Amino acid sequence: MRCAIRDWGESSSCHGIPHMAQASTFCAAIVWSIILAFCAVGFVYFFTSTLSQYLRFDKIVQLNVSFSAFEITGFRRQMERTARHFSRCFQLGLEAANFPSVTFCNINPYKKSKIQMVPALQALMTVYELSSNGTLT
């Protein structure tokens, strides 16, 4: 029986088992057993953590906002602060959302009077208002 186990160990494709079977001393076999046990435990740990991370179906969202059109004094700084706040609110809503649901932050610090000072934004607001009430087709 011992000979059969040794033959199986020497022909095994698992890296540590042949070293255990071919060890010349009992201490060397114990060292290889400990190394093999640590590797097996590490494999099980990393496999289960990777599998559980995969099965969480996390959503990764990267939000990049640039404000090159907003060069009004103080307005650009307010827009950047708002973008950071929007990004935080946007990321907080992802934990409970079912994909492809999207959660937007409902805080709107933009003043309509300031938006109307920028011609491009005023045109955008006009198009938005016309499309939202159905007159723009």
Image (cartoon, grey):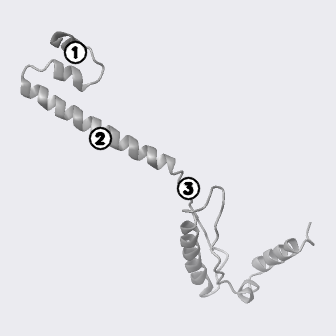
In the shown orientation, is residue 128 left or right of residue 103? right
Question: What's the amino acid at mark 3?
Answer: Lys
Q: Which residue is mark 1?
A: 10
- Residue drawn at x 74%, y 82% as measured from the top left: 118
Residue 14 vs residue 69, the one in the foreground: 14
Which residue is the site of mark 2? 42
Please name the amino acid that badge 1 sits on. Answer: Glu
Marks 3 and 2 close (CB-CB < 8 Å): no
- Secondary structure beneath label 3: loop
Quadrant position of the N terminus in the picture: top left
Give the quadrant of residue 92: bottom right
Using the image, tell me which numbered label, if any, was put on residue 59: 3
| Amino acid at the residue labelled 2 | Gly
Residue 101 image point, x, y percent: 66, 60
Residue at screen point 21% across, 10% down: 4
Q: Which mark is residue 116?
A: none
Label 3, label 2: how many angstroms apart (C-alpha)? 27 Å
Lower sequence index among marks 3 and 1: 1
Q: CA distance from mark 3 to mark 1?
A: 47 Å
What's the residue at 55%, 79% (across, down)? 81
Q: Secondary structure at mark 1?
A: helix
Pointer 3 with pointer 1, Cβ within 8 A = no
Residue at 57 percent of width and 82 percent of height = 77
Q: Position of residue 69 (x, y in %)?
A: 67, 75
**Image quadrant occupied by the C terminus:** bottom right
Helix, strand or loop at label 2? It is helix
Q: Earlier in the sequence, mark 1 or mark 2?
A: 1
Horizontal side of 73 relative to 52 (left or right) equals right
